[in-house]
Structures are given as C-alpha cells and as structure tokens.
Amino acid sequence: MSADLSPLWEVFIRSRNGLAHRHAGSLHAADAEMALQAARDLFTRRGEAASLWVVPAAAIIASDPDEAGMLFEPTGSKIYRHPTFYEVPEDVGHM
Amino acid sequence: MYTQALDTAEAQSKPADTAAAARFQARIDAEQRIEPQDFMPEAYRRTLIRQISQHAHSEIVGMLPEGNWITRAPSLRRKAALLAKVQDEGGHGLYLYAAAETLGVARETLVDQLLAGAAKYSSIFNYPTLTWADIGAIGWLVDGAAIMNQIPLCRCSYGPYARAMIRICKEESFHQRQGFEIMLTLCRGTAAQKAMAQDALDRWWWPVLMMFGPPDAQSRHSQHSARWKIKRFSNDELRQKFLDATVPQAQFLGLTLPDPALAFDPETGHWRAGPIDWAEFEAVLAGNGPCNRERLEARRRAHDEGGWVREAARAHAEKRRAAKARAA
C-alpha cells in the first residue's frame, strides 16, 4: 500500500475578515489544488471559513520541545516588559 | 461519534526511563496536554493509536448502516439531513486518522488493518438498518450514547485527540436531535408508524447499552486509561448517565423500553437496567454479528473501487510537477 501514500498538508482557516488564519487540522492530498478542495470539504461544512491556506506539513520548521525551557523561560523573569511593573500615581489618571 | 471501549489493553511499558515516565505522569496529573513531539511512554502511544484508530474506523464503518437509507429517505428535508450526517461521519473519521498519525503511524497502515479484519470498530455497526425508523433510533440512541462517550474525550490528555473531539462534538450536536425528531414524528403519526418506531427501539436498545463496553469489573484497560487521563469515566458510569438521560426521552415518545427489569431507584435517583447479554456483545466483537462480513466487504469494495482515483490523482500531481520543472 505504500504507493497510496500521499503528502500531508496542514490546513489554516480564516474564519472572518480581519482575523488571522488559524490551524484547523491536517489532511492528505496528492497536490496543492486537491488539498484545497479537500480542506474545503473537510473543514468548512458549516460556513467556518472566509479563506483557506494549505501548507505542506514537511515545510513547517518547529522548535524542539526539549529546548522549550531554554527558548521561553528567560522571559518569565523579565516582568519589566509588562505595563503593570511600573507605578504611576493615581492622580496622573489613565496612562 | 462512535468511540467504544473495545480493547485498549496494553502491556506494561519497560521501565527503561523511569525518571522520564515519572515526569510524564506528573504532567498528566497537572492536567497538561501531551503533544506529538513530547516524551510519552510507549504503552501510552500504543494505547492511543489503538483507541483513536478504532474510533476512526467506527466513524467510517458507521457511514454504512445510514448510507443504506439515503436514497429512500421519506422527504427531501430528511434526505439532506441524513446526507449531511453521513458526510460528517466521513469527516470525523478523517480528523481521527490525522490525530492517530501524529503518533507516528501512517493512515494507510491503519486502513489496511481495518480492511484485513485485524482492527476493531464499534460493535453497533454490525446491526442492520431494516426500516426508516432505524435511522431515527440510530440518531437518537447511537449518537446519544456516542456523545456521552465523547464529551469527556474533549479533555483527554493527548492534545491532537482532544482537539479532534472538540470539533467532532461541535459538529455532531445536530445528529442526535435529528434522530429524536424522526422518532417523534413517527410516534405522533399513524399506529403503523408508531409500531415501526417501537420495533426499531426494541432492536437497538440492548446493542446501544453494549456500546459503552464491558462492565467495569471485567474491563481490562480502564486502570491505565484512567491514570493517563485518556478515559475519565468508567464504562458503567457512562452507561448509567446514558440510561438516566434516555429513559425520560422514551417516556416522552410514548415508547416502551424492551427491558422488563428496568426500574427507578428512588434512593439513588438512578434508573437500573436489567442484565445485559454480554455473550452477544462478545460474539459481535468476534466477527459474528448480523452484518460483520457485509460491512467489511463494503469497505473493501469501496477501497478497491476508489483505487483508480488515488492512482490518477498521484499521476496528475506527478505530471504537473514534471511540467513545472521543465518550464523552470
């Protein structure tokens, strides 16, 4: 059955004008055109989409989960990047 | 719809990396979701592949009993709804195969296992749909039972499975209602129509109760699945929830459940069913239900007859790639 293997595509849906495309799931299709048609049938049966993207799954470069700590933990201590870190006297009003 | 607690029994994983396994269990206990690239014990991976693929197979085989009535639906409204429902089931099968594939198994491998008769699917689809009322009974009862099973799976510890289940549950909410509406229409119709509804209920009731799987005392896999937060309620707990929800609905329809021992226990506030014939369940699972052979033959035929389409799609894609390469 290995002859049946077709590439995997990741599907992204823009649900409404003005919103970003969001990952919806994945599917198999022989080429991009058929991937779009299948994505339309599979993920937008109830008016979920204003636009579709399909991306070859193999084209996605992901961060390594083992490096998640190294990559993302350092910002945990950088609370001065948030507005609540700073004190503004009440008299100043909204800022 | 259509997960069933079938056979997710799993051998103990080797204590190769006990520290990693302990960290894994700690993440599960903290209600964190496990994602495809994360560490997971082999037994967890195998249990999920088995459960998710059985669930996917059930969706795909589940299209057959209802597909049987699409061309003979009594009105255009019913036909459009049934067509949409069966199409949803095909889609749900595909979501679930995709979720299983994130665990490192190819969809083709899983489909081959189904077609070879090596994989299980929900026992309920090995019963025939003899009359139009069966379509009502399936939507009301089979989908009703499936929803009881599936809602807790939306919180399953494995991220891709949980996300597929959220989408499935959302899409599926109309399935049970359309079935109940069919039953209600028949029950408010002529005496013959009501008798048809009663006959369908009589035939589907016990197989539906069996959908939740063997009683907890005999269930081989519940412990692991509960510890891993794959399964959050036991077979008997889910069966009880279904019973309590469904008995009043049958009463509303004016139908009689085919269980002379059925009784309300005022102390606990629960309905108690009579004994379930587990020998029948085992026989159906073993391949000896009324329609097991027919269902597998239908799947094999569909797969074989679709072969040229897959081949043509691949040839077309290859030709386009080659033409593009030449032009570049």
Image: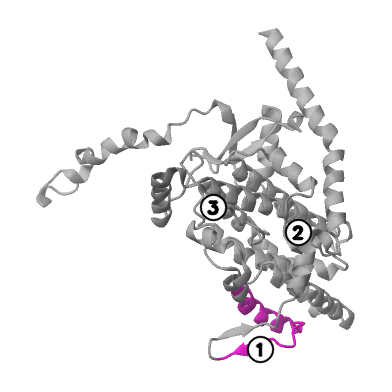
Tell me the subunit letter for badge 2.
B
Where does label 1 land, which residue?
B263
Mark 3 or 2, closer to the camera: 3
Sequence-wise first label, 1 or 2 = 2
Residue B166 drawn at (x, y percent): 56, 54
Give the extent of the magenta segment.
B241-266
Mark sitting on residue B81 = 2
Residue B61 drawn at (x, y percent): 77, 53
* Disc 1 packing (10 Å; few <14; some 14–19; many ≥20): few
Residue B101 drawn at (x, y percent): 61, 40
CA separation in Å, label 1 and label 2: 35 Å
* Disc 3 packing (10 Å; few <14; some 14–19; many ≥20): few
Q: Residue at x 46, y 47 (%)?
A: B15
Q: Is residue B246 magenta?
A: yes
Q: Residue at x 73, y 81 (%)?
A: B253
Residue type highlighted by circle 2: Ala
Seen in the image, is B3 located left or right of residue B186? left
Tell me the subunit letter for badge 3.
B
- Callout 1: SS: strand
Residue type highlighted by circle 1: Ala
